[in-house]
Each structure stands twice: as C-alpha cells, then as structure tokens.
Image: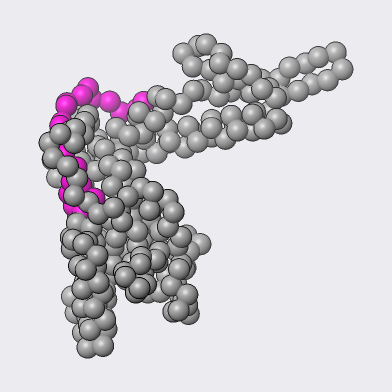
Amino acid sequence: MDIIQRHIALKINYLERLIRQMPDVSTFTRINKNSVSTKVRVHRNGTTLYTAGAKTQKGQASLLSGELKQKYLAELNSLYSYWHSKWREPVPKLVRKSTADGPSVRSPLLSLENYLRAEPYCNLAYPIRNGILLNDKMYRSKGEIKVAGNLSSLGLEFKYETMLDAGGHGVFPDFFARSVEINNCAYVEYCGMLDDPNYYNQYIMKRQLYHNMGLREGVDVVFINEFRDINVSDDWIKLLILHALEFDAKFEVQPMQFRTRL
C-alpha cells in the first residue's frame, strides 16, 4: 500500500467512524388547531432522541448537524468511488498502534493546541501586494497556489503565514498543515526562486532558524524547492507532505469487506 492509498483509506476510516457517531435528523410538520409548525426530530437506530422546534436554537443546531452529516456522506461516497476505480480492492481498516511502540518525537510547536491557536496572515511586515486568489484566500505566488491546491486536494486543514517565535525572530511558515485523520501537523515552505542569490541566502537563514528551534527537515518542516527550469510535480508535493505527517504514526492494517457506499 503506497502512501496516497493509505491516506485515502485513513480518510475513509475516519469519515465512517464520524458518521456512525452522528444521529439522523429529519423534519416534520405539526398541525395544531390554530397553528402549523415545523419540528426537527433527532433519532438513532429508529429511536427518537429528542424533538425541537425548527426555529429554536436547538432545532437550528440539529439541522446544521444533519446538513454536516449529509456533507460527510457525500464526501465518503466520493472517496469510495475513487478507491474502487483506482485500486479495485477492499478498503482496509487502519488501526493506529499504541504509543507503547515508541514515544512521539514531534516538536511541541506542532501540537494540536498550537495549530488551533495559530492565526493566519500574520506577516504584516510584508503585506501581500498583487497576490493571487484561491478559494477566497490570497497567496503571494503561483507556487504557493500550487501547494495550497495540493493541501486542499488531500483534504488537509491548513493555515497560511502563521507566526513562530524563534527566540526574538518572527518566522512565518508558508503553511501550517494538519491531518485530522492522523492528528499530526507539519509546516510547509515553498521556495521557488532558489536561482536568485539573495533569495537563496534568506532560504538558508530560515532553514537555520528552524534547525535552532529543533524542527526536523522533511518531518516537522517540509521544503518544496523549485528552480527556473526544475519544477516539482503535484504527486511529489503530496508525497513529501504525507510522509512528514505520517512520520511518527504507525498503523496496523486489518482487511475489511468490500464496500461501495455506507
């Protein structure tokens, strides 16, 4: 199983667990003598958990939960179709091994708490001018657009230009990426002007700052390096990022039944 196939299997496993934990939501109309009202019914396995008015806060929250479940179902069925058209084999169940197999050495800077606290677009000393728009977000270059597109196509969460304190020096990684399925994070740097001596010197200084912070290249920080005549393919970008996110994660593979829809 290659790393892309494992990533898709992990996403399928994650969505299956998530959907099974979510109750079903439906609406019905209640007609009284003097009024007609819409109610929301929340149920699981044929048992009603509660009903609420569609316009109440609880009812609105339940409707949003129902919409979210439908979104997850659509995503899951799309992944099923992709899996079976590409590999034509059962989707395995991937179980993460316990930490008894060895403690994680991933930096505390890459913790979930840090990711949730991180604010994007913090590099105010160098505002984005003539940026490029992708999915209502601005990026500095076509190369960063390419990386952002690959992160999105992998279904990874990410934040752009968050800030790290490198002992009095502000460092702004291009991307702070997170895999929900693996629950690991990594910084991703796009470096696309390495032919330029000044840019190259800044690149070396930034690598040294990451090293001083105890961040490992290729694991905690991924560098996507391009030159004028040497471009990196989308597949290679995905492999570099997934390898970093999976570095400390070990999985046991348990074959499961062939399935096409949940």
Question: Is residue 76 in view?
Answer: yes
**Residue 46 vertical position relative to residue 189 in the rendered view, above or below:** above
- Assign the C terminus to one quadrant of the image: top left
Q: Is residue 94 magenta?
A: no
In the image, the segment drawn in magenta is 241-262
- Residue 174 vs residue 7: left or right? right
**Residue 245 vertical position relative to residue 77 in the rendered view, above or below:** below
- Assign the N terminus to one quadrant of the image: top left
Q: Quick one: which residue is furthest to the right in this view? A: 34
Image point (64%, 33%), residue name: 60
Residue 214 image offset from top left, x and y in percent: 21, 62
User: Total of numbered circles in the picture?
Assistant: 0
Question: Is residue 238 in view?
Answer: no
**Residue 194 vertical position relative to residue 257 in the rendered view, above or below:** below
Q: Quick one: which residue is furthest to the front in this view? A: 167
Image point (53%, 32%), residue name: 65
